[in-house]
Image: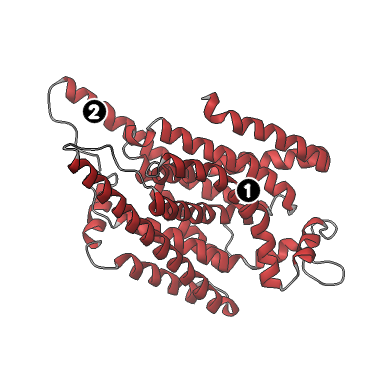
Amino acid sequence: MIRIFGLSILVTIASLVVAWLYGGPEAFALALILGILEVSLSFDNAVVNATILRRMSDFWQQIFLTIGILIAVFGMRLLFPLAIVWITAGLSPTRALDLALNPPPGDAAYFPDGSPSYETLVTDAHPQIAAFGGMFLLMLFLDFVFEDRDITWLSWLERPLARIGKLDMVSVVVALIALVLTAEFLAAEDKVATVMVSGALGLVVYIVVNGLGELFDAETHAEHAAEASSHGGPSELAKATGKAGFFLFLYLEVLDASFSFDGVIGAFAITSDPIIIALGLGLIGAMFVRSITIYLVRKGTLNEYRYLEHGAFWAIGALAVILLITVGNIHVPELVTGLVGVALIGAAFITSLISNRRDGDRSGDDTPAAVPVG
């Protein structure tokens, strides 16, 4: 346990010290609050990360846990909000950073000269961010529920959806319908085109990265199967290496970014200081989320609790819907978003425990194993 969470604890202590030196007790408290919120509301992110990470070789797992953390901390939590201001407001990087570090007095959304604050500029860009992230996550969820699986959790719903999934490209069709409805009925009139383009880009990025990952993953499995055949016996479960590992890494990074969109935007309800956001959401929160991911992979938790993965993907579906709803500037508290994910994963965990206990009881009676509930 210490080997897995030790680095996160050390980084947390160091981050809080930096926050204190940067802004005193107030910055310390804000960084701590943001870190706690990120950890408590991102457990579904860790579960989904673990389902993909366990398919990757040790080398690519280490890449995700090293280079990936730099992208998560400095890319998404520090540079991403600044980049939004650079692009959407047409400001230079130095001006955007100046706005971020020197907000208007009090809680004002505008400076005395009428120019918008950094927080206002980032918030104004939320519809396109939510459309991109929402479509990416929606495609991930739809591909999961439309796939035929031996084990189902909400069988009364998942089995009919699996039958519908036999239709070619049904995930894309459903996602595009959701995007059109979102743009038509939720987006502001001057944001319709932007939401459509951003959502389409989210869908395209998912299809390209996921498709390339699956292509090279299939090649890796074929190579392992050929090697096993030449040696006259079965081989260990193939892990994604080379190009397959690289595209799974890209897929995981985009997925991780999509999960963090709402957290980054929501952080502005607490503070607009990019340094504190990077310390709280990034160094503290993201590090602990990765530690939880490692724990789930190393301990084989997803194999032991059979429905945990299902609960995580249903949480992804809920997050995708929430992101699309917020395109229309409908505020959904981050606490609600997090609690929905926790509730779904918690229900899946409890159901797994019950099912495992039934399997144990029936194996003791020498009767066939329990069929998945639902």
Amino acid carrying label 1: it is Val
The residue that mark 1 highlights is 73
Q: Earlier in the sequence, mark 1 or mark 2?
A: 1
Q: Residue furthest top?
A: 364
Real-space Cα separation, disc 1 to disc 2, in angstroms = 43 Å
The residue that mark 2 highlights is 358
303 over 71 or under it: above or below: above
Question: Residue at 19% across / 33% down in the picture?
Answer: 370
Question: Residue at 36% across / 34% down in the picture?
Answer: 350
Q: Residue furthest front?
A: 230
Q: Quadrant of residue 113?
A: bottom right
Question: Residue at 29% across / 47% down in the picture?
Answer: 154
179 over 212 or under it: above or below: below
The C terminus, quarter of image: top left
Q: How many marks?
A: 2
Q: Compare residues 326 and 267 and report the one nearer the observer.
A: 267
- Picture coordinates of residue 136, whole percent (x, y): 45, 61
Position of residue 91 in the picture relative to residue 10 (left or right): right
SS for callout 2: helix
Mark 2 closeness class: few <14, some 14–19, many ≥20 residues within 10 Å:
some
Question: Residue at 37% across / 40% down in the picture?
Answer: 308
Mark seen at residue 354: none
Mark 1 closeness class: few <14, some 14–19, many ≥20 residues within 10 Å:
many
- Picture coordinates of residue 253, whole percent (x, y): 50, 53
SS for callout 1: helix
92 over 290 or under it: above or below: below
- Picture coordinates of residue 44, whole percent (x, y): 46, 44
Q: Compare residues 29 and 250 and report the one nearer the observer.
A: 250
Q: Quadrant of residue 356?
A: top left
Amino acid carrying label 2: it is Arg
Q: Residue furthest left?
A: 367
